[in-house]
Structure formats: structure tokens, C-alpha cells
Image (cartoon, rainbow, N blue to C red):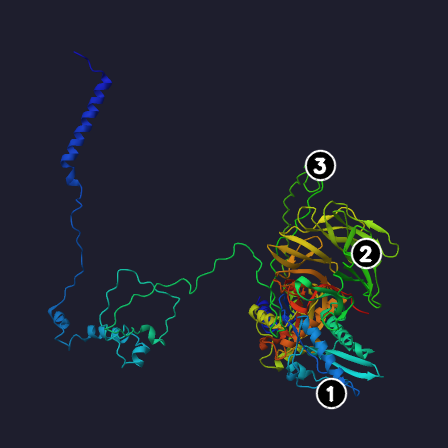
Amino acid sequence: MMKQLMISALVSAVALVTPAIAQEREGPLKIEITEGVIEPLPFAVPTFVAETAGADQYAKDLAAVVAADLQGTGLFREIPSEAYISQITSFDSPVQYSDWKAINAQALITGAVQTVGDDQIAVKFRLFDVFADDQLGEGLQFVGDRAGWRRMAHKVADAVYSRITGESAYFDSRVVFVAETGPKNDRKKRLAVMDYDGANQQFLTDASSIVLAPRFSPTGDRILYTSYETGFPRVFLLDVATVGRRAIEDQPGTMSFAPRFSPDGTTVVFSLTTGSNTDIYTLNLATGQRIQLTTQPSIETAPSFSPDGSQIVFESDRSGTQQLYVMPAGGGEATRISFGQGRYGTPVWSPRGDLIAFTKQNRGRFHIGVMRTDGSEERLLTASFLDEGPTWAPNGRVIMFTRETSGSGGTSTLYSVDITGRNLKAVLSGGSDPAWSPLLQ
Amino acid sequence: MSVIPQDMRLGAWVSGLGHGGLFLWLIIGGFFVAREDIADFTITDVSIISAEEFAAMQPSSPETGSAPAALAQPEIEETPPTPVVQDEPEVPQPAAPTEPEATPLPVPEPETPVIVDESVPISPEEPEVATAPELDPDAVPVPEEAERVAPEAVETPDPDVVIDETDQAQTAPSEEPVTVVEEAQEETARPPSAEEIVTEAEEPTAAAPTQSVRPATRPRRPPPTVVAEPEEQPTVPGLQEAISGAVAEANSENAVEDNANPGVGSGPPITQGEKEGFILAIRQCWNVGALSSDSLRVTVVVGVAMLPDGKPDNGSIQMLSSDGGSGAAVRQAFEAARRAIIRCGVNGYDLPREKYAQWKQVQITFNPERMRIK
């Protein structure tokens, strides 16, 4: 009995002095974090290193455009150069991470530019995760014409954006739109293209006739649009490189409008008015075969293909008010997807396929909104006197649209907004009906 | 002449006796009942004292009766002198209730009960509380304004969600962190209705049970475990092994390391509050604003070794597992988690140093489920 008591006491004593051992047996401390912060990621883009004579201006301009691209997304925040502790004087010199950590630069982009021959430049860059003391991905280099230096800057920004966010990018893309000049009662409208940020505007048509609703082809080399040059709306196909054009639908006594390419670029879907009825048709560009998709006595227009080409979303007033419907690409029974108050129009399927952007009119106000393809989770992103005509960025994360101000002196301005409704900003004044191109190759 | 029946005669007797008794009670019953108007009297204890004792109680004879006076005096002296009175004796306080000299007698208690607000801390360091405000004798009393419920009138809420009538202002690039405002949703689409009417009889019966399930029988009680009477001799080696094993582990390398750093050890179990503080510190740096929607579907579990000063060993940060999303999305989610751990741990996390053994290795799950707004 005495022996048992002694053993018990000894065991108790050992247990008292070994809690740490017991704890370590339980393994690491486990915690779960379910909430973080949503704020722009601070980054630094020092002026690129000019490695050859004559590259100084390019070095400055390239860094400035890269910074503007990233900051313009609302997801990044540029740290001003005045705060820099380190200076990048050589592209290959090691990065002083501590200096960039001190100014809370979470991403660092270093670059260099050199002239190649008489008319080309070469741009290279690296991206660093400052707090991980490591480079993110591989460095890249682009070579191109000096005149295309902005595109090279956009490509650098695209690579950085994709590497950090995981999203595909959209900076190296173009937008076709209707350039508007003059007062409202005598407004001149011309087709024009520009970089996504409003730079590099070029006119594609003159102002002799009204043009509407231009749409890029999936490859970006052709543009569909509607012109009133014959007195009636007609759909035309324009080649961007040669600016040559032809009418694709020219039947007397009809009106064709609201054209849009199929995802493979072989077919055009559009509205055709015969008599007093407007229906949706497809036209094979190669064979000229035309197929009528809707037969309702109501007005069906503004068709848009889903990215996989299997469905078409369009607007119709068959229910008495203007609403959105989805039908198979070959025609057939349509399903109504919009049920909110007001009228819905100009639906556009997202390149991702997950959302449909639209224009909504309710209580005298216009909105740009998005909804799921089944009509659920409707979300209004904007509100103004007149917002209309959304178009998707190639990555399906940003929408550009037209905002028109009221009054006789009202103007049209191109705006862009994130699909979360944040980062609403003006892109270009004096433009309407934008259509985003795919990412340029 | 009528004849009274026998049973009626008995009733007459009973009635007569009853009424007679009642009259008798009314006449003489009062002597047996105590009257209510008799005044109560109290009985007090008295003690018989001698003439000498009475003389000793007289105030004119201090040499013999100091005991009662000595008892009365300490009551005043024992009253704790408040710092107010001692610190500011010169300040005239006509209505100061804290001066013991001014209140030698107990103030009659008001009939209404005194309500003590326990929420107000009693602080002797606040003389203003006990000091009566100085009153201007010439001042005309002005009635106090009625207290308002709120400094400003509350606006009437909109009866319905109304879209702002003003144009949205263009956003300018700002260095301020973007505050996420969830867009108010309007009507969403109704679920599609059935294309044909299906009656209840035609409805497939898969959803409803066709036969009730017989309840399971009550589980049988497990047979009692026969505990063998422990024999003294065989148990000793087992215990000895356990003891020796525990001692060996206590003398292991980790324990030696802990002992080598006084103040850095296992300590008591890490508290929930300490854990919450750790979580709060990391999440301040977990920025998911630049993550793709795919990355926001990824939950990553990250392992990190911590240094005794609370800083993470940056080289040790590794992804242990992930759930959801593609390869690229997982990579971006892990990188955001790694940035969070490193950024907010630059100066060391506020973790109890004496419990280092418990947070030497940390496993952090970054779950962005509540951050999905895109």
C-alpha cells in the first residue's frame, strides 16, 4: 500500500512538470482567419532604366503608363516616387527589399528600355513581391515599333495585373465607339477607335451619315455597325486594316440594325424589320444564309451570343414591357430572365459567361446593371439621367458604357465601372456606343 | 285540540335550546372576548443600579465616567477623513456634506429610500462631485431646459429603397482605402414556374415516406466490464515505464531549450483572448482587394514557424493545403496570405513569450468565404 502511494505521488509530480511536453504533442497552434481587408495594393514603378541613348523619354513614359494602367483599375495604389528610398539604376542590380518594405510597397516593378535599330525599342521588366523577398514569375521582354510604345507599356501592365490578381488582363485592348461632335440638334457621328484608356483615337468613317452600334469581331480585325447613309438603317461590315466596308443586309423595304458577331466570327446576329414587325435573324457571312430566330409579333432586338455560342440573350416587349429573354442560338422557345421593375434593354453576355450586363430604365432614371444568366442576383452599378449601352472588357471585370447629360447642351461621355460598382470613371468625352475589342495579340 | 307529532316535538326542543343559547351568548359572551381598543403596552428592561453608579454616569463627574465618552468619541474620529476635506480645508464649502465637524449628528433619514447608482464610480479624487456649486444669491433662478432626446431630429427613413436621384460623381484616383459598399439589390428573377400542372396524386412519391419506420429497439446495456483486481506486482513496471518516459521527454531537447531561455516556455495554456489578438493582427494585413474572384474561392492552410520574439520565420512559410480554385488562383491566394503574415509580423506579433512552446509552430487557415463580394 505504501509503495502504491509513493508511485502515485511520483506520477503526479512528473505530470506537473511536463505540461509543455503535453502541449507539444498537440501540434501547432491552429487559427482561422475569415476576414481581411479590401484595399488597393500599394506598388512602386520606378522610372525604367534607359540602357541606350535616346531611350530616356521612353523609360519615363513607359513607367508612367504602366502605373496609370494599374492604378486605374482601383485595385492598386501607386506609391509616389518622392517616397522612394532606393533608386533603380541598373536593371540587374539586386533589389534592396528593406527599402521598399519601409515605404510599404508590396509590389515592385523594375524595367529597362533600349532602342533597337532606328525604329524599334526593347522593353523588359521584372515584378517583385517585396515582403516575400522574392521575384514574382519570370521577367519578360517585348520588342516593337517605337510608335507602339504605349502598347508595350500596356503589355507590361497586363502581365503584372495577371500575375498579382490571377485575372486575365485588358489593358492592351481597343474600343470602337461613335465619336460625337456638335450640338444635339446637329450632331456629327463618326466611327472611331481608341486605346482602352482613351488614347490614340482614330476615325474610321466620315461624318456624312449617322452611324450606330459598332461591334468588334472576336479577332478584332473587323467591325459591324449600323449606318443611315441610304436613309434607312443598314448593317455594314468594315475591315479595320483597310477601312473597306460593305453592307451585309441590303433588302429593299427592310431595316437591319443591332448587329453582333458570333463567338467564332462566322455568323452575324441582328434585327431585321419587315413591315411593322422586328425579329432576330442570323446571317452566315461565308454562305449568306439567313435564318429567322424569332417569329413573335412583338419587337425583338439587341441580340448577344453567349461565349460558347449556344445561347442568345435579347430584349423583347412581348410581355407588354421591354424585358430580357434567353433562347437557344438556333432559335426556339425563349425564357424571360428579367422580372424587376422598369424596362430592360441592350443585354450583353460577359466574356466569362457568368453575367449579363444590361441597361435598365426605372422611374425616369437609367442604370447599368448586371445579373446572372438566369436573371438572379441583379445588381445595378450606376444611375444617372441616361446611362446605356454596356460593353465588357476582355476579362469580364470592367464595363464601359455611355452617359449622357440632360439639356440641349448635354454631352455624351464614355465611362467605365467595375462589376462591383466601384471605380466609376470617365474615359472619354464626346463618345457613345462603345464596344470593347478582345485582348490584342 | 291538535296533536303534535313526536318528530316535530323534538325539532321544537332543538330550536328552543338553540335560540336560548344564542341569546345567552349575546348577553354574556363579551366577557370572554378581548377588546380591540385596549392599548398595547411595551415592556422595557430595567436594571437596578446603585447610587454610586448613577453618580458615575453624571457628566459632572469626569473622573469616574470616562468610559461612555470614550466610546462616543471614536465614532467621529473613525469616520475616514475624505481627501477632499483634508486637501482643501480653506475652500469655503457652505453645503459641503463631507465635513465631519459640520455634521456631528446623524441627519434624519428621508422616508424615501435612497437609490444608489452603482454605475457611477465613487472616486475620492473628484472633489467636484461632493462640493456644492457656488450660488449667486442675486441670481434669478432659471428653469432648466428640458432635456432633448437627441441633439438633432432623426430623419424619417425612406419608406422604400430609392435610387439616388443625383448623378454619380466620377471617382478620382484616391489614396484612401476603398470601402466596400454592397450594392443594394432590387428585384431578382422569380424562379421559373412549372410548365405543366402536376397534381398531388401524380407527383412522384419519392419525397414522402410510404411506411413509417419502426423505432429502433432500445440498445442493450453493455455487459458490465469485469475489472480484474489489480495485482500489485505487475502494475509497477508499467507505471515505471510511464514515469521514465515522461522524465525522458522532459529532459528532451525542446525542454532543454525552453529551460535555457528563462521566461520563454510553455506556461499556462494559451488563452482565447491571446489567440483572438493574434488573429486580429494578421487579418489587418490580409488584403484580398486585388485578388481575383477565383482566388477568393480558395481556402489555404499555411504553416509558419515563429521565432521567440514573435516574428515569423519568413523562410518557413509554406502552404500546407488548399481547397477550391485552380492552380493559379491557389497561388495568388497563398501569396496574399504570405504577405499578410510577413507584413504584420515585421515587428513581432504580440504573443505571450512564456508560452512560446505553444505558438512555436502556427497553422493558419485563410478562409475568404466572407470576403467574396465579386
Toward the viewer: A207 or A84?
A: A207
Q: Which mark is residue B202?
A: 3
Toward the viewer: B108 or B248?
A: B108
> Residue B68 is drawn in which quadrant?
bottom left
Q: Are marks 1 and 3 in contact (CB under 8 Å)?
A: no
Residue B202 location in percent, x, y? 71, 36
Say if A135 sits above or below B9 in the image. Answer: below
**Subunit of label 2:** A
For label 2, the crowd category at 10 Å Cα-Cα, with few meaning under 14, some 14 to 19 and many 20 or more, is many
Question: Residues under labels 1 and 2: Cα distance?
Answer: 53 Å
For label 3, the crowd category at 10 Å Cα-Cα, with few meaning under 14, some 14 to 19 and many 20 or more, is few
User: Which residue position holds label 1?
Assistant: A89
Q: Looking at this view, name the residue that lies furthest to the top.
A: B1
Q: Which mark is residue A3?
A: none
Toward the viewer: A21 or A411?
A: A411
Say if A366 sits above or below A63 in the image. Answer: above
Toward the viewer: A292 or A39?
A: A292
Q: Earlier in the sequence, mark 1 or mark 2?
A: 1
Q: Give the residue type at disc 2.
A: Val
Question: Residues under labels 3 and 2: Cα distance?
Answer: 45 Å
Numbered disc 1: secondary structure: loop
Residue B49 location in percent, x, y? 14, 66
User: Which residue position holds label 2?
Assistant: A268
Numbered disc 2: secondary structure: strand
